Image (cartoon, rainbow, N blue to C red):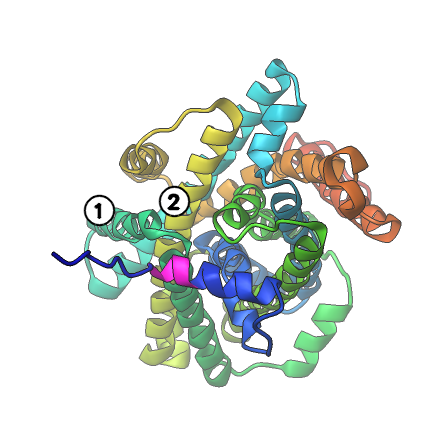
């Protein structure tokens, strides 16, 4: 009788190679690829359909003038995703679990409820985006597109049970599709690169409506569920056994955050640039994804419109799957509830069906979902700053003074923008934005 030899899974083989890097047995530039994964998965949240909606409005309505908002939001996102990864690597706990451990029951229940609302708002944008793309590309009813999106995203989620690596590779492939689509768009659209460069480095806020879109951009870029998720993604990989290994993991993690989120930032800028180049001169009223698609065809040709829809579908399906993963992690971390992934998928996609059945404008729903996220965002941001600056939690890896100041400033910027938007929403005049 011969013993059956079980071949190590892809995730197990990756873990073994990461361990070789940590112990100094493996070196070289290729080692970075072993650590690529958590930030790549988190980065899909920065290229979801909510970004499409807010970026189209920013580019068509204000040309290149709000590109600096995209840059600022991306830099803040880069810093906070790195902090989230650091929390998971150093403590072995994800952000939701740390909130459960560190805060009183009433506080964590409120935090959980707000985070669940944010997760639903996130999935509304992501689920609708994939459905809109399918509906427009194949001419199917929107509800049929939603049904197909539900099946595809559930299929993607099934790979999550096979270890961390298959999901990382699938999401990485879809991120590549989105990036390639926008590289193609940049060659098709008649971009004014001088104006685009000026928009990146020159802060301006043309009017009150631009502020609403700017907060939407930030809500669509710095995502609450991505902050929770990133810390949890590090738990499923090779764990550090001592401070030297933690330092190595953090170094690779920081590099991955910079690269993955720089790519996400460039994709976001490309979205605004494409909308500015195609629509701002003569089509400033283009504010909906459907209108953008139909307007692109006569302006830039059918190829540009098709590439736009392919990127939208890849974005919606991948980000919806990742959003469901994050929602599961939030629920389990805060209150210890673990429900089947299919049930979680069903609950989070219900708001999207309600929106469509009520006849709500889908792009408006996408934009306002991002504003909701912007208000939920300070909770994980403040928690991350509190935890990562605390030596009792982080030991020698607690934030140094410069990083601590930068994180606090980033949080204050978000809080101030949210306060201004709240005043504006309730009709309170804001000086300079009347």
Name the side, left or right, on which 90 lies relative to 36: right
Residue 147's mark?
A: 1
User: Does the magenta segment cover residue 237?
Assistant: no
Question: Which residue is denoted by mark 2 in the rendering?
Answer: 361
Please give the name of the residue rendered at 53% of the width and 26% of the height, measured from the top-left corner.
Answer: 334
SS class, disc 2: loop
Q: Earlier in the sequence, mark 1 or mark 2?
A: 1
Find residue 328 and report its horizontal and vertical position in percent: 42, 36
Q: Nearer the viewer, residue 328 or 234?
A: 234
**Residue 12 inside the magenta-drawn segment:** yes
The range drawn in magenta is: 9-13
Camera-side residue: 162 or 271? 162
Secondary structure of the magenta portion, mostly? Answer: helix
With respect to residue 165, does 305 lie above or below?
below
Question: Residue 377: image x %, image y %?
Answer: 62, 39
* Quadrant hosting residue 270: bottom right
Q: Look at the image and tell me whether residue 36 can be seen.
A: no
């Amino acid at each position: 009788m011969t013993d059956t030899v079980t071949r190590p899974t892809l995730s197990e083989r990756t873990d073994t190679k990461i361990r070789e890097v940590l112990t100094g047995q493996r070196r070289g530039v290729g080692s970075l690829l072993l650590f690529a994964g958590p930030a790549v998965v988190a980065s899909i949240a920065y290229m979801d359909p909510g970004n499409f909606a807010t970026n189209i409005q920013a580019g068509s309505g204000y040309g290149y003038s709000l590109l600096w908002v995209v840059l600022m939001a991306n830099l803040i996102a880069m810093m906070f995703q790195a902090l989230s990864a650091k929390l998971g690597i150093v403590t072995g706990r994800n952000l939701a679990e740390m909130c459960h451990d560190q805060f009183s029951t009433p506080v964590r229940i409120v935090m959980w409820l707000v985070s669940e609302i944010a997760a639903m708002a996130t999935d509304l944008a992501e689920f609708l985006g994939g459905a809109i793309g399918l509906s427009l590309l194949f001419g199917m009813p929107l509800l049929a597109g939603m049904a197909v999106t539900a099946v595809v995203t559930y299929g993607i989620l099934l790979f999550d049970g096979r270890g961390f690596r298959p999901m990382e590779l699938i999401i990485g492939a879809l991120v590549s599709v989105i990036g390639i689509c926008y590289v193609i768009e940049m060659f098709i659209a008649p971009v004014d690169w001088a104006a685009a460069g000026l928009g990146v480095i020159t802060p301006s806020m043309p009017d009150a409506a631009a502020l609403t879109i700017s907060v939407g951009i930030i809500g669509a870029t710095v995502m609450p569920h991505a902050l929770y998720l990133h810390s949890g993604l590090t738990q499923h990989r090779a764990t550090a056994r001592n401070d030297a290994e933690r330092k190595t993991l953090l170094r690779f993690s920081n590099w991955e955050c910079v690269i993955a989120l720089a790519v996400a930032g460039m994709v976001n800028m490309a979205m605004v640039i494409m909308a500015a180049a195609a629509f701002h001169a003569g089509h400033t009223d283009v504010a909906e994804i459907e209108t953008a698609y139909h307007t692109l065809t006569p302006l830039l040709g059918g190829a540009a419109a098709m590439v736009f829809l392919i990127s939208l579908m890849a974005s919606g399906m991948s980000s919806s799957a990742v959003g469901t993963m994050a929602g599961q992690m939030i629920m389990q971390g805060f209150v210890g509830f673990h429900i089947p992934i299919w049930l979680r998928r069903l609950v989070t996609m219900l708001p999207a069906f309600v929106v469509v059945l009520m006849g709500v404008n889908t792009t408006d729903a996408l934009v306002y979902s991002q504003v909701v996220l912007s208000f939920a965002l300070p909770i994980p941001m403040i928690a991350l700053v509190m935890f990562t600056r605390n030596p009792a939690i982080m030991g020698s890896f607690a934030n140094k003074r410069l990083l601590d100041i930068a994180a606090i400033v980033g949080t204050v910027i978000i809080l101030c923008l949210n306060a201004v938007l709240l005043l504006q929403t309730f009709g309170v005049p804001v000086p300079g934005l009347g």
